Image (tube, grey):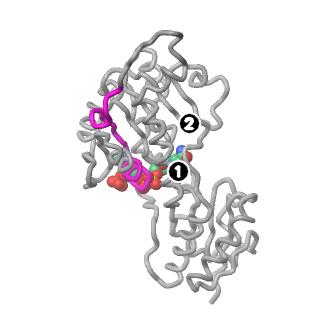
């Protein structure tokens, strides 16, 4: 039997994905017909992004699985029928991109680069940053992206803690879990990186209480999702100096409205949701492998747990 695979990602990415997916199905020996247009009742698998053409799944009556092209699935979980298995994107290219973005922004804070980029105005002021081993960094979320970023920071010598829902053991990282674990993970955190999913349980993980646990002047880096932070609490913490600076890539409303106080705040860097992208060639491998598994009756990789929302 040939599996009918509907590509329902962004239209402009179809010319890139078509040859990559076709080559991967051939390589894996999967009989699949992959197109960007199919009669819905004939579709077995949907390769899906919310920015693509499908919003109503009801006409797809014989779906075997939906494969998200995005790692964050908070907009996808509510629309995909509960009976249909849903996988999320875990892609080595996405991990590498996120790691580079996180390491770059962490080093900016660690080395105090802004001081020299702004310039010292003729003042020979020598500020020597500590070595990485004396800088405590906490990564909230130890999944695919959090673990890759935490390991890269630890490899540079940073003193890294991490926090997740379930207890982890990762070499070189001090791992914490649960509400008490969050307190411990934040108390020493000079730089906090958020790589949690957006779920009801993670909303406002950083709020006025948890921000107050940080050492004064701590830096925040959020490439996770906007709702992880209580914006009013962060702005108050920035104004009081409790938080020294924040680099924010994701927001409750995107694009971030021009009048939002983050744009003008002197201690906020806004980046427009560019921390990392799904990379076509490695993503095509993951998608094709999952369809091979489904056709062979093997367990799917990276299944979303609907009850947890990620
Ligand atoms: P994963 O699902 O692999 O990891 C999520 C991590 O968060 C896990 O360690 C999980 O714990 C932890 N977690 C979930 N809920 C809680 C909770 N209530 N309390 C404590 N920890 C919790 O996701 P990824 O690493 O692949 O991606 C993380 C997020 O990054 C995505 O959801 C997305 O929002 C964002 N992202 C942003 C991009 C950008 O360009 N800005 C690009 C791609 C992703 P446990 O391990 O115990 O399950």
Nearer the observer: mark 1 or 2; the answer is 1
Give residue 285's position: percent from left, percent from top.
Answer: 56, 70
Query: Which region of the structure is painted magenta?
Result: 129-149
Please tell me whether residue 200 is drawn above or below residue 284 in the rendered image. Answer: above
Give residue 83's position: percent from left, percent from top.
Answer: 51, 69
* Badge number at residue 97: 1
Could you tell me which secondary element the residue under label 1 belongs to? Answer: helix
Label 1 vs 2, first from the N-terminus: 1
Res 277 seen here = yes
The residue closer to the viewer here, 89 or 310, is: 89
Mark 1 nearby-residue class (10 Å; few <14, some 14–19, many ≥20): some
- Asked if disc 1 and disc 2 are in contact, CB closer than 8 Å, the reply is no
Residue drawn at (47%, 83%) of the image:
297
Residue drawn at (45%, 38%) of the image:
228
Q: Residue furthest bottom?
A: 1
Res 309 seen here = no
Residue occupied by mark 2: 252
């Amino acid at each position: 039997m040939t599996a009918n695979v509907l590509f329902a990602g962004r239209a402009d990415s179809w010319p890139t994905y078509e040859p990559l997916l076709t080559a991967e199905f051939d390589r894996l020996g999967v009989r699949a017909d992959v197109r960007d247009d199919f009669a819905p009742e004939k579709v077995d698998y949907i390769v899906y992004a919310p920015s693509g053409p499908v919003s109503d799944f009801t006409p797809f009556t014989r779906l075997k699985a939906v494969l998200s092209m995005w790692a964050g699935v908070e907009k996808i979980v509510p629309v995909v029928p509960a009976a249909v298995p849903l996988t999320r994107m875990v892609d080595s290219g996405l991990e590498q991109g996120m790691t580079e973005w996180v390491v770059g922004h962490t080093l900016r804070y660690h080395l105090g680069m802004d001081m020299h980029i702004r310039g010292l105005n003729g003042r020979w002021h020598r500020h020597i940053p500590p070595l990485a081993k004396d800088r405590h960094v906490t990564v909230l979320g130890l999944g695919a992206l959090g673990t890759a970023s935490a390991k890269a920071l630890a490899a540079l010598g940073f003193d890294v803690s991490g926090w997740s829902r379930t207890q982890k053991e990762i070499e070189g990282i001090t791992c914490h879990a649960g509400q008490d674990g969050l307190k411990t993970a934040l108390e020493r955190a000079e730089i906090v990186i958020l790589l949690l999913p957006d779920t009801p349980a993670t909303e406002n993980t950083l709020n006025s209480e948890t921000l107050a646990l940080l050492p004064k002047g701590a830096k925040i880096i959020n490439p996770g999702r906007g709702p992880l932070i209580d914006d009013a609490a962060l702005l108050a913490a920035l104004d009081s100096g409790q938080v020294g600076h924040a680099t924010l890539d994701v927001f409750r409303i995107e694009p971030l409205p021009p009048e939002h106080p983050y744009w003008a705040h002197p201690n906020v860097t806004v980046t427009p949701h560019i921390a990392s992208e799904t990379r076509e060639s490695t993503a095509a491998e993951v998608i094709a492998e999952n369809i091979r598994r489904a056709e062979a009756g093997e367990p799917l990789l990276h299944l979303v747990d609907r009850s947890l929302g990620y």
